Every structure is written in C-alpha cells, then in structure tokens.
Amino acid sequence: KKDVKLRCDYSVIGKVIDRFGNDIVINPVSEDEFEITETVAVGSTFFSWLFNYAGKITIVAPEEVKADFMELINKFTTKEESDRSKS
C-alpha cells in the first residue's frame, strides 16, 4: 500500500467518499477541484476505479504510481497498434 495524492473534480465527491469514507480530508484546489491523500493498494483494482471517472480523478503523487498508471495505459495503446499492424 502507498499514500497516493489524487486531484478530483467536485462532481465525483460522492464517489470519492464512497470509496474512502466520510473521514477523508478534502483540500480545495479551485472552485472545481479538490485533493485528497489516501493509502491505497496500488494495482489493477485501483487503476480500474480511476478509469471509471475518465479524467475527473487524476494521480498527483507519487511519481511512481503515476508512471505505473501510464505504463498500464500504454499497454492498451501498444496492443491496439500491434493488432492493427497484423491486420
């Protein structure tokens, strides 16, 4: 598990509370966004949860978790490009 800082659109605040509980500390960033830092099990379940929100929740830190997420995204695009070249 790792402490992960997330930047979230206020439109998903209910989903964030559902995931992490009512006792989260919400740090306003702007009128539209807030940040939280939570301890999460970094892996496919966490990343799939992020995918559900199509950019309304982004990873701010740590860099290692951002890189892991980008690597997963790249696997999807690399596979798609590889599949196209086989056609």
Image (cartoon, rainbow, N blue to C red):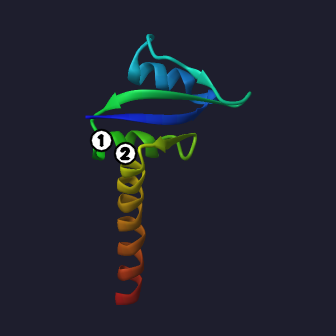
Chain-order first, disc 2 or disc 1: 1
Is residue 14 among what the camera can see? Answer: yes
* Residue at x-position 39% and y-position 21%: 20
Q: What residue occupies the far bottom of the structure in this picture?
A: 86
* Residue at x-position 45% and y-position 11%: 22
Screen quadrant of the N terminus: top left
The residue lying toward the viewer, choosing from 47 and 61, is 61
Q: Is residue 54 above or below residue 40?
A: below
Under mark 2, the amino acid is Phe
Q: Position of residue 16 (x, y in %)?
A: 48, 25
Under mark 1, the amino acid is Val
Q: Is residue 58 above or below residue 24?
A: below
Q: Position of residue 56 (x, y in %)?
A: 58, 40
Q: How many residues crowd mark 1 within 10 Å: few (<14), some (14–19), many (20+)?
A: some
* Residue at x-position 37% and y-position 48%: 65
Q: Which residue is mark 2?
A: 47
Disc 2 to disc 1: CB gap under 8 Å: yes
Q: How many residues crowd mark 2 within 10 Å: few (<14), some (14–19), many (20+)?
A: some
Q: In the image, which disc is placed on residue 42? A: 1
Q: Is residue 33 rendered to the left or right of residue 3?
A: right
Instruction: Give the quadrant of residue 50.
Output: top left
